[in-house]
Amino acid sequence: MGPGPRPERRRSSRKENQAIRRHYAARRRREEAKEAADSASAARLLAALDALDPGRQGAGLKQARDRAALSGEAADRAAARLVREGVVEKVEVEVTVGCGARRRVRGLKRRGLSG
């Protein structure tokens, strides 16, 4: 015995179709705005890294984040984007903290022509 007759599919009204198109257009605009913001954050983080580390030995991620005035989440997304694009690499760097003590922290290093 077969599956039986298929139930009739209700056709969408014109208003419903317009609402669906508006929904997807708004989603697309939000995604484009987020992409533009992430791109700007990556540029700011890269500029901060260049200022902190002109010798391209590496700089602490928190130092670069503070210099670029980014939140932790925005800096992490920007760093991940720059690593994915091959512009920087993740490294561990030694920084001076509080009363002159040295500490190893997560950092970034810009890839050079030989990097």
Image (cartoon, rainbow, N blue to C red):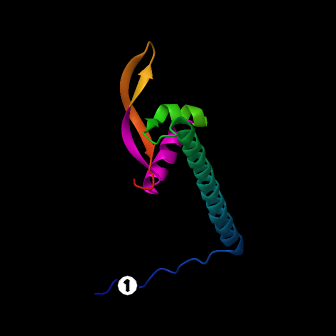
**Residue beneath the point at 61% across and 78% down:** 11
Q: Magenta stretch: residue 109 in it? A: no
**Residue beneath the point at 38% across and 31% down:** 105
Q: Does 104 sit left or right of 18 as displayed?
A: left
Q: Which residue lies furthest to the left in this view?
A: 1
Q: What range is drawn magenta here?
A: 71-93
Q: Does 67 sit left or right of 93 as displayed?
A: right
Percent coordinates x, y for residue 109 in the rendering: 43, 43
Q: Please state which amino acid type lies under the numbered disc 1.
A: Gly
Q: Nearer the viewer, residue 4 or 95?
A: 95
Q: Is residue 113 above or below residue 73?
A: below
List the residue tagged with mark 1: 4
> Residue 28 is drawn in which quadrant?
bottom right
Q: In this view, does 28 lie above or below 34?
A: below
Percent coordinates x, y for residue 39 in the rendering: 59, 52
**Residue beneath the point at 70% across and 75% down:** 14
Percent coordinates x, y for residue 1 in the rendering: 28, 87
Q: Is residue 48 above or below residue 42?
A: above
Number of residues whose C-alpha sits closer than 10 Å to that of mark 1, classed few (under 14), some (14–19) or many (20 or more): few
Q: Magenta stretch: residue 92 in it? A: yes
